[in-house]
Image (cartoon, rainbow, N blue to C red):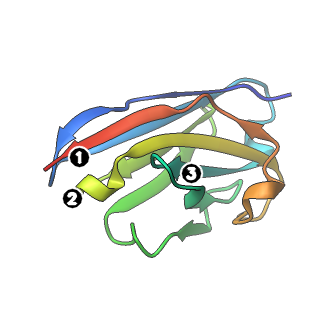
Amino acid sequence: QVQLVESGGGLVQAGGSLRLSCAASGRTFSSYAMGWFRQAPGKERDLVAAISWSGATTYYADSVKGRFTISRDNAKNTVYLQMNSLKPEDTAVYYCAAKFDHITVVVQSRYDYWGQGAQVTVSS
């Protein structure tokens, strides 16, 4: 069982930056692939970025490539999402998720554990 808690959301002006953190419980965090998803009002939840258990492999949605960076610190049981050059269309609730797997997981339905979400609002 893994429990995930996101933090770091908030309100930022367009062009600004935020860093989301997701702290995981349990001693086997390094065995989990991790992902960040987001859901804007009235829209489906979509994958933003994913990272393999070791951090060696990452995946980004086209809409955030070059602006967002996913990383992890297995010693701290934490995964991060650094968000730069934020746009109003990045406004959403951001969720982290975990899947017991060593590869980078890009299919939402394969994730087993989810955090409660963190609101990110980007003003124009």
Mark 3 vs 2: CB contact within 8 A: no
In the rendered structure, find residue 6 and report the number of the disc placed on it: none
Q: Residues within 10 Å of mark 3 (few under 14, many from 20)?
A: many
Query: Mark 2 highlights which residue?
Result: 85
Q: Are marks 3 and 1 in contact (CB under 8 Å)?
A: no
Q: Is residue 90 left or right of residue 102?
A: left
Q: Say above or below: 111 vs 12.
A: below
Per the image, label 1 sits on a secondary structure element best described as loop
Tell me: 90 left or right of 24.
left
Crowd class of label 1 (few under 14; some 14 to 19; many from 20; radius 10 Å): some
Q: Name the residue located 60 percent from the left edge and 59 percent from the top edge.
A: 50
Query: Residue 74 location, x and y as percent?
Result: 63, 39
Circle 3 residue:
37
Disc 1 from disc 2: Cα separation: 6 Å
Q: Marks 1 and 2: CB-CB under 8 Å?
A: yes
Amino acid under disc 3: Phe
Most extreme residue toward the bottom is 62
- Which is nearer the N-term, disc 3 or disc 2? 3
The residue located at (82%, 56%) in the rendering is 110
Where is the N terminus found, in terms of image quarters?
top right
Say whether residue 45 is left or right of residue 70: right
Residue at image location 24% in from the left, 57% down from the top: 87
Hey, what amino acid is under mark 1? Answer: Ser
* Picture coordinates of residue 30, whole percent (x, y): 74, 43
Examine the rendering and report whether any part of residue 2 can be seen: yes
Dot 2: element: loop
Q: Label 1 belongs to which residue?
A: 17
